[in-house]
Amino acid sequence: MNDHERDDDANRLTRRHYVAGAGAAVAVGLAGCSDDPEGDIGATETEGDSGGGSGGDTEDGSGGDAEEGDLEIVHWWTAGGEQDAYQALLDGFREEYPDVEIVDNPAPGGAGSAIDAVIQNRVLDGDPPSTFQIWPGQALTPYTDEDLLEDIGDSVWTDEMEEAYLGDIVDLARPAGNLVAVPINIHRLNNLFYNVEVVESANVDPTDINDPQQLADALQTVADETDATPLAHQTQSPWSSLQLWESIFIGMQGVDAYRTFIDGDVSSLETEVRNALELLNTYSEFFPEDAGSISWDQGNSALIEGDAAFIHQGDWAAGQYRAADGFEFGEGWDMVAFPGTTSVYQSVIDSFVFPTNNPSPEATEKFLSYAGSVDAQARFNPVKGSIPPRTDVPTDDFGPFLSRQIEDFNNSNTQPPSIAHGTSVAPSVHSSLEEAFANFNGNGDVDEAYQAIANSF
Ligand code: BGC
């Protein structure tokens, strides 16, 4: 399905509320947002995904013509195969609750780079949407600190639902004790995807790359032997470099050191942090020339087209391969765990919440209950490229790639949460690290980046 067809699809589903437009994300600054003295709330980085502008009222999540009782959903799933997964979720919801009017209101931008500012302003102003996409864990805390999320421990989280979920994931949905979120998926972050034909033509065997340094050698070989971009990385928005740094760090130092880092003890890891930055600098020699102006899914498209060899991304990238015609797992593309991280399943999770002052309590409760159901997770995850957090979802139709991911998840020693995807560090730390990596993308200055990272905690 190409972007236009996808847009048409979304258009059909949301015609009542659709306003055509260019699909660029907007940056909304939070200066003067008085309830946010520590700057926890807010981010100004935005990255327009190539598939953005797929539907919704205003294309920036800022509200619009939702009427009282309508289910307004703000999310950032507009790129790659994300939109198909989101539509699969809505299709299932509509089958079960045909009476609920849905107002789809995306805030496009990879890794939620445009959603925070919009949502936080609206929630603080007492004008929230019915629900919105958010990482569980630390990302929820600015809202739970201010009591801005309903306790859904009785209304949505039945005993049956709680028992069916992986326990660690349930815990992420209650950072302050009460259950406030419904996780819907588990992505893996530490993947190295590749175009099979391109790496073969360079005579590189990704299964032989054993550590992050060897990956630099493989990228050099691709550069020497082919015309393809070795690593289809984007630097328009800092999150992809931050997540790549996380994988390099874990690949070089292991998960215990990573956990020490996210606990804020950076100074005991100075050399290790710097070494991972140095290697990221080396990788950057192999980024696309236009890395600074593309989105993650545009980088991934280059891999699909055979113009790039590798990409480091969460397995949402696999959702995009699924949506591409004739690009099959094992033949067109494949994936190895990021070198040095084979036994690790670094997790990225999405959830939906029930903001207080809710414009549609009944519809919101229905949607959250549905998001936590077997049916929702069976429809959504195979298209999204993720695996379900419920343990009782039939996965026979998840295909060979996700079946392998499920096996890897079950065999993994540890599933540490990501920094770049908000679960593991407080939002203030997250934004400050993003700023450090935005600067590092621009100047490659290891000393400056190290100081900025150390000062983030
Ligand atoms: C989200 C994914 C999404 C990815 C790229 C991550 O933070 O958890 O659902 O596909 O960002 O936008």
Image: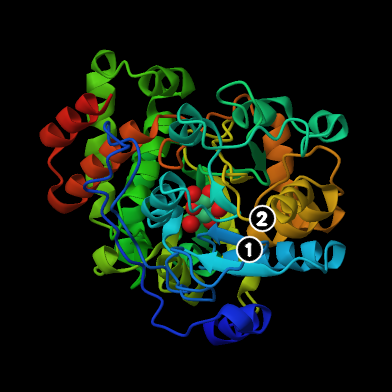
Quarter of the N terminus within the rendering: bottom right
Look at label 2 and name its amino acid.
Answer: Ser
- Earlier-in-chain disc, 2 versus 1: 1
Q: Circle 1: is it few (<14), some (14-19), or many (20+) Cα within 10 Å?
A: few
Mark 2 CB within 8 Å of ligand 1: no
- Regarding residue 126, the answer to whether it shows in the image is yes
- Residue 450 vertical position relative to residue 215 in the rendered view, above or below: above
Residue identified by numbered label 1: 68
| Residue drawn where x is 34% and y is 43% of the image | 242
Quarter of the C terminus within the rendering: top left
Q: Where is residue 190 in the image (x, y as percent from the top left)?
A: 50, 42
Q: Position of residue 290 (x, y in %)?
A: 26, 69
Q: How far apart are marks 2 and 1 (CA)?
A: 6 Å
- Residue 214 vertical position relative to residue 232 in the rendered view, above or below: above
Q: Observer-nearest residue: 418 or 336? A: 418
Residue identified by numbered label 2: 360
Q: Observer-nearest residue: 16 or 301? A: 16
